[in-house]
Image (tube, helix red, strand yellow):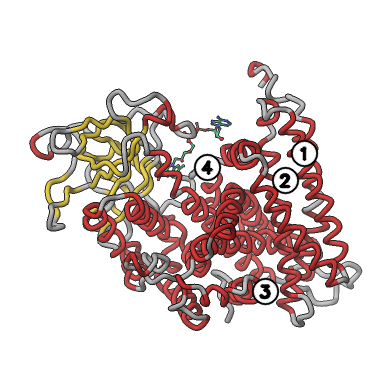
Amino acid sequence: MASEILSARDVDFLLFEWLRSEELFEREPFAQHSRETAEAVLELAETVATERFAPHARANDLQEPSFDGTTVTLIPEVGTALRAFADAGFLTAGVPESHGGEGVPTSVVSACLAWFHAANTATSGYSLLSMAAANLIRTHGTDEQRRLFAEPLAQGRFTGTMALSEPASGSNLADLLTRAIPQDDGTYRLFGRKMWISGGDHELADNIVHLVLARTPDAAPGTKGISIFIVPKCLVAEDGSLGERNDVVLAGINHKMGSRGTVNTAPVLGDGAHRPGGAAGAVGYLVGSIGQGLPIMFSMMNEARLGVGIAGTAVGYTGYLKSLAYARERLQGRPFGAKPTEPQVALTEHPDVRRMLLAQKAYVEGALALMLYCSRLVDDAHSLEGEAADEALALLGLLTPIAKSFPAQWCLEANSLAIQVMGGAGYTRDHDVEQHYRDNRLNAIHEGTHGIQGLDLLGRKVLLDGGRALGLLVARIHETAERATAAGESGEAYAVSLLAMTARLQEVTRLAGEAGGGADVLAEATAYLEGTGHLVIAWLWLEQWLAAHGKEGAFYDGKRAATAYFFTRELPKVGLWFDLVAAHDGLTTHLDPATL
Ligand SMILES: Cc1cc2nc3c(=O)[nH]c(=O)nc-3n(C[C@H](O)[C@H](O)[C@H](O)COP(=O)(O)OP(=O)(O)OC[C@H]3O[C@@H](n4cnc5c(N)ncnc54)[C@H](O)[C@@H]3O)c2cc1C
């Protein structure tokens, strides 16, 4: 029976029929792998996700983490699942062999992570954080930091956190207040309050490695004065053994709408709750140099934002599969014009239910294509050289805000449609889809909100870049359109619509640039993000249409139907978003808040 977690068939289509991942195994960094080893890793992901992650996804929500003032308690299945994840090698699957990993291409690892997030996104959150923390230390830390912190993180003995946000500093990190005071022995003592920190305390591992943003005395104001520190929950001796408890405790935990199994915490540093070395202050170790906190954190941002995009996609995907299975079984009503004496039909026989299922399919399969395309760009940047590698990196930077935002918005819409397809049953806790909706709602908020992604795309990635990366995207869209035109049939018509909307993107970008990217223009950054996001997904649907071209069977017919849906029902919406950018009429810039 096909899984209701994710579609192995679709993953296989995207990686091997569309992205031709075999080409990667001919390149030096991935030469030790083959299609067979990649398929074995994917199968292992499916098995561990199905057997260890999915079974407690509901319990993780119903019995959310609790805090008694000292200890955070989670259901035991979380620890068992994370152990299985580590034992199966997923914490280091994508790490280059030269750094002690298995060197599996990121595109394959991303597909594996989609299995875990679809099965249980809350438990998967801990692994994602540990992998990101280990990567940051591996890339920017000293040899000793790698040995004492990155290695145990990679083995699953420690877990990691990313401690950026503070109560008064969320989207705008420039104003964060946590202080780091240098000590004679080269360490720092940290004092301050953090907020919203995922995985900030628990008993899942021997130790927790917090990566904390803080300011040193006399640091420059704004983002230039921010540095990054390793602050372990327990100090670690030279030989790797655990020492005293560090001065970092919780003020409390946050009670969330969804994704409840990932404990969310409000840590306090330097309150004197513990006194390492006889003094208050959380002991911290500088990573990189002073003032490099944000550049270092942002160097990991593509990875973190792709991680959020994969989570959003996966949660949308499993909701689609579950509502589809329900709609195939549930008998309700008769086709238009049928007699009351005729038998009732399955929900899938009603065109409006098909519309909702097709919309979900178009969003979630389109989003998965985007996530794997971006992951392939990571692989290309690592395995190609010169201009080709630069091009992959530039395109990845441009697409990252879209990869973070499209799934958060449209795979959430898919989750809403999954509830709608199932009617009253979908709204109850007897089925998973209501939890998927709540779990997925987070993804437009953390790792930079939806609005912040829009500003990043239009302000930084397009206008500040002078349109270079955008030019690369436009060139790739043109190349796809050429192949679609040559393929004929509906490909020709799709190419015409796609090129027309791409020309509109170039036009509104030019207008935004001519207007100097001022406040009125940036006020429409979200419209720019959403319009460009839909255009990119349309492009990737045409890519999938081409990969399915000339092939027969329900699977390929499904790809053609979803392409038709996206081009006729979704792509036309782009015009409205782009009109708003072109007009940048200042409606919200000049609005008096008193009128709201
Ligand atoms: C469940 C959860 C887990 C999290 N995990 C972590 C974690 O592990 N580590 C961590 O450091 N943080 C974490 N965060 C924090 C998260 O990154 C922040 O919530 C997010 O950055 C937004 O900050 P804020 O909540 O203070 O909202 P605000 O910054 O107050 O924003 C509120 C609204 O105003 C908008 N807004 C704010 N400024 C602007 C602007 N300049 N222009 C336009 N619009 C603007 C935002 O887009 C948003 O819609 C987590 C948050 C949640 C809810």
Q: Say which residue appears at 13% left-offset and 38% top-offset.
A: 185
Label 2 beta carbon within 8 A of ligand 1: no
Q: Which residue is mark 3?
A: 329
Q: Which residue is mark 1?
A: 508
Label disc, if present, on residue 359 of the rendered structure: none
Which circle's residue, 1 or 3, is located before the other in the chain? 3
Type of residue at label 1? Val
The first of marks 2 and 1 along the sequence is 1
**Identity, as a three-letter code, of the amino acid under mark 2:** Gly
Return the disc, 2 or 4, that comes first in the chain's sequence. Answer: 4
Q: Position of residue 593 (x, y in %)?
A: 64, 19
- Under circle 3, the secondary element is helix
Q: Check the picture and name the quadrant holding the C terminus.
A: top right
Q: Nearer the viewer, mark 4 or mark 1?
A: 1
The local crowd at label 4, few if under 14, some if 14 to 19, many if 20 or more residues have their Cα within 10 Å, is some
Which of the two marks, 1 or 3, is nearer to us in this view? 1
Whether 271 is drawn above or below 287: the answer is above
Task: Give coordinates of residue 479: x percent, y percent.
Answer: 75, 62
Q: Amino acid at mark 3?
A: Glu
Q: Are marks 3 and 2 in contact (CB under 8 Å)?
A: no
Which x, y percent locates residue 101? Answer: 35, 68
Instruction: Give the residue pinned by disc 2.
Output: 531
State the residue position of label 4.
445
